[in-house]
Image (cartoon, rainbow, N blue to C red):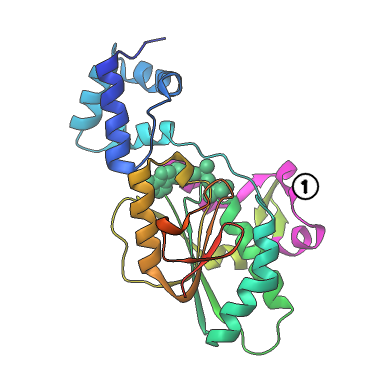
Amino acid sequence: MIRLNESEYTEIVNYMRDHFGIDLSKKKVLIECRLAKPLKNHGVESFKDYMDLVKKEKSGQAAVEMVDCLTTNYTYFLRESIHFDLLQEKILPDIFDRNCLDLCNIWCAGCSTGEECYTLAMAIADYLDQRRGPLPKINIKASDISNAVLRKAEEGIYPIRELERLPKPWREKYCNEAGEKSFQIDRRLRSWVSFRKENLMQPEGAVKYDLIFCRNVMIYFDREAKGRLIKKFESCLKAGGYLILGHAELLSRGDTKLEPVFPAVYQKV
Ligand SMILES: C[S@@+](CC[C@H](N)C(=O)[O-])C[C@H]1O[C@@H](n2cnc3c(N)ncnc32)[C@H](O)[C@@H]1O
């Protein structure tokens, strides 16, 4: 395997931090292992040559491939399931009762292969099935920086073993067979979600959200990038809107103006 020297290592760490906020400063071996294949495919013999290629290549394809290799995309259905209980019992009733919404805008940031945004869609559909009165239109933006994961997420097809994590009524209502060993998320729920390739370090558009999920993304960021991202979330939440982070990403008082309301759940008051 080709090894990284110190200056090459620093260059890659700086590139990933400056462009994407991702902190790889203690991940030398991970970089060497994950980039071994692209180095081989491009026929380059050092990380320096590889980085020159990434920076010079006009199509940007080599850069995309590098990001696909260096992001960690681990995810699964109903991850940190307490958030989906809170969603049905506290957060959705609060959002819908307070605002009488006809459109509910949700952002699932760092959605990886889609399990999180589809769990979210199932939890919402299940909640709405039991709610009386006019129902709001649900709009979920699911974003990630990696092309590879977004392609998979958009299909909404998963191996049948992943079904085991979901409650039986959800499997029956929201998942359809897709061949012998796979299932696909129901078309109605898929129609609620639009996938976007977006870098969380770039400025956000004008849309204001009722709810933002960004779980297990900031754990890979350095302090400065985390601070910038929290400010961005603060400004694109509606008053009364909620931000949900991973349980390993708790904020302290000095980090945010958002109010902590449940574990790893913050509200713009
Ligand atoms: C570990 S996964 C978390 C997936 C899901 N949120 C969950 O909790 O299961 C982190 C995701 O964040 C994405 N990510 C990392 N840095 C990003 C950035 N700067 N902009 C957008 N997405 C990013 C990665 O590509 C990866 O898919």
Is residue 70 toward the left or the right of residue 42 in the image? right
**Residue that lies at the very extreme toward the bottom in this rendered image:** 133
Q: Residue at x 61, y 65 (%)?
A: 189
Spot occupied by residue 247 in the image (x, y as percentages of width and height): 59, 50
Spot occupied by residue 165 in the image (x, y as percentages of width and height): 74, 49
- Verify whether residue 147 appears in magenta: yes
The quadrant in which residue 132 appears is: bottom right
The N terminus - image quarter: top left
Q: Is residue 77 visible?
A: yes
Count of all numbered marks drawn on residues in the image: 1
Q: Residue at x 32, y 29 (%)?
A: 13
Spot occupied by residue 164 in the image (x, y as percentages of width and height): 77, 47
- Verify whether residue 46 appears in magenta: no
Label 1: few (<14), some (14–19) or many (≥20) C-alpha neighbours in 10 Å: few
**Residue that lies at the very extreme toward the front in this rendered image:** 254
- Magenta stretch bounds: 146-174
Is residue 69 toward the left or the right of residue 80 in the image? left
Spot occupied by residue 35 in the image (x, y as percentages of width and height): 40, 22
Q: Is residue 146 visible?
A: no
- Residue type at tag 1: Glu
Pointer 1 residue: 164
**Principal secondary structure, stretch drawn in magenta:** helix
